[in-house]
Image (cartoon, grey):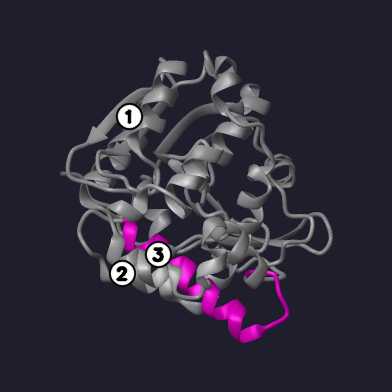
Amino acid sequence: MENLYPAIKPYVTHSFAVEVPHILHVEECGSPEGIPVLFVHGGPGSGCEAYHRQFFDPEKYRIILFDQRGAGRSTPHASLENNTTQALIADMEALREYLGIEQWVLFGGSWGATLSLVYAEAHPERILGLILRGIFLCRRQEIQWFYQYGAHRIFPDYWEDYLRPIPPEERNDMLGAYYRRLTGNDDIARLTAAKSWSLWEGRAATLRPSKGVLNHFGDTHTALSLARIEAHYFMHNAFLRDDQILEEAGRLKNVPGYIVQGRYDMICPMENAWQLHRAWPRAELSIIADAGHSASEPGIVDALVRATRHMADELAPA
């Protein structure tokens, strides 16, 4: 069983100004001469965590992490202004050019997998490879599964806590009800909704309960950006056509990749990964028998670290 690499710190950080009013927090770790890899965090809105640096051999990779618009240490925090999928793709391209990178590996899970796929389909010539986990294709059926009908049958106890901030007459559209509170002017209602939304996700993220995961999702700073930005994106269908990613998967035909999927992922069910693999057969699919959604679960860590090692070997000069 593979484990994370030892903890490391960035050798440089950047405050990268993009479209007003956004300034992105960017950090680089590992080897400046290594294979460039961009860590694409989930959510949207969750931000990067320190352990995200540890999936990569620091002697082989130039590890780049960035907090997307409104997330993590990017500013303004939890901002929805000029915050769309297309804007994030433009940010990634601008960052690549700023850092002087011709091609890079993208590593992302959940929404990070979504954004990586959309970027790769838009710019396949910039991709050395993709390493993806917990596949989220951002289709309406997937959003409905987790926030309206489906996952509540697995977690009826957690679902009651998710329902609590919303009066019964609004519960036929939980996403809309939460969005109104998360974007409203009532500070108490906004924070209450954010905590409830975020904890629903955190509780469902692992096969076995994880205090560390719950602490992350329960953190007020994380919960506010995660809930507001997720609701904003999902109300707008993630600014994508339904099934856009699968329809355009042919653009990935020359892109090597690894897909890591927990068998018991209740946030992004395994059907998504299976359909992506069928549409993108060049990618190697690893189904983790004893895992859910979180990148921190042991089986997921093992598969992701193996994938980064294999990718480094494949990209090494002959």
Q: CA distance from mark 2 to mark 3?
A: 15 Å
User: What is the CA distance from the residue labelled 1 to the residue labelled 2?
Assistant: 28 Å
Q: Residues within 10 Å of mark 1 (few under 14, many from 20)?
A: few
Residue lying at 52% horizontally and 79% vertically, measured from the top left = 192
The earlier-in-sequence mark between 3 and 1 is 3
Q: Residue at x 55, y 37 (%)?
A: 139
Identify whether 309 is placed above or below 43: above
Labelled disc at residue 200: 3
Q: Secondary structure at mark 3?
A: helix
Is residue 138 visible in the rendered structure shown here?
no
Q: Main secondary structure of the magenta part?
A: helix
- Residue 268: x and y in percent read 40, 43
Considering the image in quadrants, where does the N terminus appear? top left
Write the residue at 64% across / 44% down.
Answer: 238
Is residue 241 on the magenta stretch?
Answer: no
Residue of label 1: 310
**Left or right position of 148 against 161:** right
Mark 3, residues whose alpha carbon is within 10 Å: few (<14), some, or many (≥20)?
A: many
What residue span does the magenta drawing correspond to? 182-205
Amino acid, disc 3? Trp
Q: Which mark is residue 212?
A: 2
Name the one closer to the observer, 16 or 76.
76
